Amino acid sequence: ALALLALFLSLGPSATASAAAPPDVSFAQDTFRATEGDGFATITVYRNSLPVSRLEVWYDTADRSAVAGQDYGHAYGRLVFEVGVSEMTFPVEVFDDDNPERLEELSLVLGPAYNGSNAAAAGPPAVLLISDDDPAPVPSTLPLRDANAASRSSVTAQPNRQSQAGGAGGEGGPQPVTAQQATAVRRRVTTRQSPTTPFELRVQAGGDGAADGTGDLAVDPALAVLAGLLLAVVAGKVWFACRPAS
């Protein structure tokens, strides 16, 4: 039993260490970023093991929302870590266009180069995000403004038919309105909307009371009712005071 326990203790840590051992090479980060105006993105690969031997690894790109040949240039090749080298990079070309686009992405993949003992165990893939450098189009309000201007210009003042007919000078046509006719005494009751009352009675009378021949008297219905009530109360008190004694 003691021998089996000693054997288990001796094998356990080594098995755990081998299971948790990192890959020989891996990307420096899970997500890389670039902009269309950059021209290319630089991808960094780290060597996790000691640089005491020569290692080789293949890299490749794969489409996701970004398409090779339209959004980026397909990149693939081999990285060789010589003795003493722990970091290497490779470029991915990024295409620039004038079309506003959403954020696009592509996959970056590492794979072992099967070359005997120099083949490296590769880590998980990474992602390259490509952002657009073109501003989003701003919707123009010019058509709406043009439509409003056209509607305003189409509204013109109606000509005075009587004045045009009178200006023709024809004997049979209607005569222009004289000043006496314009200032003739007339009364007119109109209803006008008021900001303080539901409606307002306005009596306009022509005559000498106004410079232009029209007089204006506004009557508020609420004030008229209040004045009538006051007059009724005063008349009742006068009648009560002057009534003959019984």
Image (cartoon, rainbow, N blue to C red):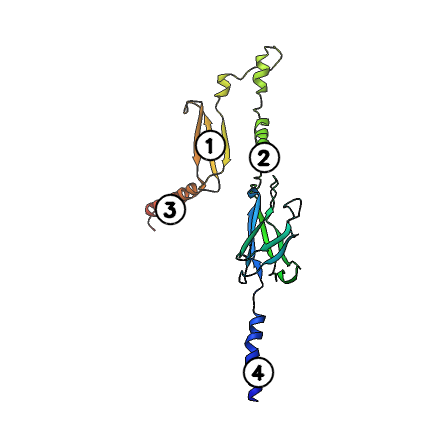
- CA gap, disc 2 to disc 1? 44 Å
Where does label 4 land, which residue?
Answer: 7
Res 116 quadrant in image: bottom right
Instruction: Please tell me how crowded label 2 is: few (under 14), some (14-19), or many (20+) other residues with Cα within 10 Å.
Output: few
Q: Amino acid at mark 1?
A: Val
Instruction: Please tell me how crowded label 4 is: few (under 14), some (14-19), or many (20+) other residues with Cα within 10 Å.
Output: few
What residue is drawn where x is 60% and y is 54%?
79
Q: Which mark is residue 233?
A: 3
Tell me residue 138's x, y (percent). Answer: 56, 39
Tell me residue 10's x, y (percent). Answer: 55, 79
Q: Amino acid at mark 3?
A: Val
In the rendered image of this protein, does residue 183 appear above or below residue 67? Answer: above
- CA gap, disc 3 to disc 1? 27 Å
Q: Which mark is residue 203?
A: 1
**Does the CB distance between marks 3 and 2 fall below 8 Å?**
no
**Which of disc 1 and disc 3 is earlier in sequence?**
1
Tell me residue 110's x, y (percent). Answer: 62, 57
Mark nearer the viewer, 4 or 1: 4
Where does label 2 land, which residue?
Answer: 144
Mark nearer the viewer, 3 or 1: 1
Kindly state the secondary structure of the residue where label 1 is placed: strand
- CA gap, disc 3 to disc 2? 63 Å
In the rendered image of this protein, does residue 31 appear above or below residue 152? Answer: below
Count of picture labels: 4
**Which of disc 4 and disc 3 is earlier in sequence?**
4
What residue is drawn where x is 59% and y is 52%?
128
Res 220 quadrant in image: top left
